[in-house]
């Protein structure tokens, strides 16, 4: 059974940093491209970042470019999102999702940016 | 960026009746490989999104056959042939053809 489990969310002050993790199981992680997608409270879905299986290609939404860094460790079956210079508008549930067409999603981890 | 426009915003439906959601893209979603990467997602209250339909009209495994997708180019539709109570939630279209990936604003399906 495919499982994606996010962790690392929490309360952080504006300007602070946070690192999210996504632990993958039930499939060969190293064969799949991965994404981060977020959802602000009561709002719709917003794609954040994408990384190919070998980390050779990475894309970011303009809203996070220069502040967020996506990475992965295929040996640990894990996906990461390093978030720096956080703003109030980054407050959201962050989901990891498998492949470019977002077939499988995790349960999400809540990031709250507030003083 | 490709803008995805969904309508209606809210869709009250009587149990057992059909429902239809429209999604329009600001440019063609036909990819260079000939495929059209238009997907539909369901998000039930308090749950993560779940993909229902991929490449316009292909149902994901486990998705009831009352859900169907159609369309081409820039105009797409999700239909529920007979709404059940478990179908309550928000439905999103999403294009996977162009970067950045973009979603429609969502359509909230509720029971009358």
Image: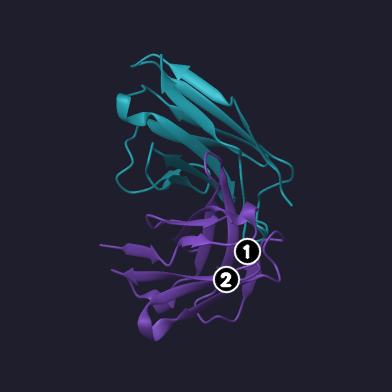
Chain colours: A purple, B cyan
Asked if residue B58 is positioned above or below residue B24 in the image, the reply reads below
Q: Residues within 10 Å of mark 2 (few under 14, many from 20)?
A: some
Label 2 marks which chain's residue? Answer: A
Q: Residues within 10 Å of mark 1 (few under 14, many from 20)?
A: many
Query: Is any part of residue A93 visible from this angle?
Result: yes
Asked if residue A50 is positioned above or below residue B94 in the image, the reply reads below
* Dots 2, 1 in contact, CB < 8 A: yes
Secondary structure beneath dot 1 equals loop
In which quarter of the view is residue B4 placed? top right
Label 2 and label 1: CA atoms lie apart by 6 Å
Query: Is any part of residue A100 visible from this angle?
Result: no
For residue B27, which numbered disc appears in the image? none
In which quarter of the view is residue A59 placed? bottom right
**Residue A78 placement (x, y as % from top left):** 40, 76
Residue under the point 56% across and 53% down: A91
Q: How many marks?
A: 2
Labels 2 and 1: the sequence-earlier one: 2
Residue under the point 60% across and 68% down: A16
Q: Quick one: A95 or B22, which is closer to the camera?
A: A95
Q: Residue furthest left?
A: A1
For residue A17, which numbered disc appears in the image? 2
Q: Quick one: B16 or B29, which is closer to the camera?
A: B16
Is residue A75 toward the left or the right of residue B107 in the image? left
Q: Residue furthest front?
A: A115
Residue identifier under label 1: A86
Residue under the point 67% across and 57% down: B98
């Amino acid at each position: 059974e495919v499982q994606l489990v996010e962790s690392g969310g929490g309360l952080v002050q504006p300007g602070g940093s946070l690192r999210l993790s996504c632990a993958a199981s039930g499939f060969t992680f190293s064969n799949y491209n991965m994404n981060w997608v977020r959802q602000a409270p009561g709002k719709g879905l917003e794609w954040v970042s994408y990384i190919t299986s070998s980390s050779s290609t990475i894309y970011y939404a303009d809203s996070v470019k220069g502040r967020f860094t996506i990475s992965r460790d295929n040996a640990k079956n894990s996906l990461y999102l390093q978030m720096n210079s956080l703003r109030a508008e980054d407050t959201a549930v962050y989901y990891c999702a498998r492949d470019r067409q977002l077939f499988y999603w995790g349960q999400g981890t809540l990031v709250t940016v507030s003083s | 960026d490709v803008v995805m426009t969904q309508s209606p915003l809210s869709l009250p439906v009587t149990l057992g009746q059909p429902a239809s959601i429209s999604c329009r893209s600001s440019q063609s979603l036909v990819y260079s490989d000939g495929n059209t990467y238009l997907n539909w997602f369901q998000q039930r209250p308090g749950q993560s999104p779940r993909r229902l339909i991929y490449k316009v009209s292909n149902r994901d495994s486990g998705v009831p056959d009352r859900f169907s997708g159609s369309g081409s180019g820039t105009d797409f539709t999700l239909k529920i042939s007979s709404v059940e109570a478990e179908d309550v939630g928000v439905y999103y279209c999403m294009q996977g053809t162009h970067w950045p990936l973009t979603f429609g604003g969502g359509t909230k399906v509720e029971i009358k």
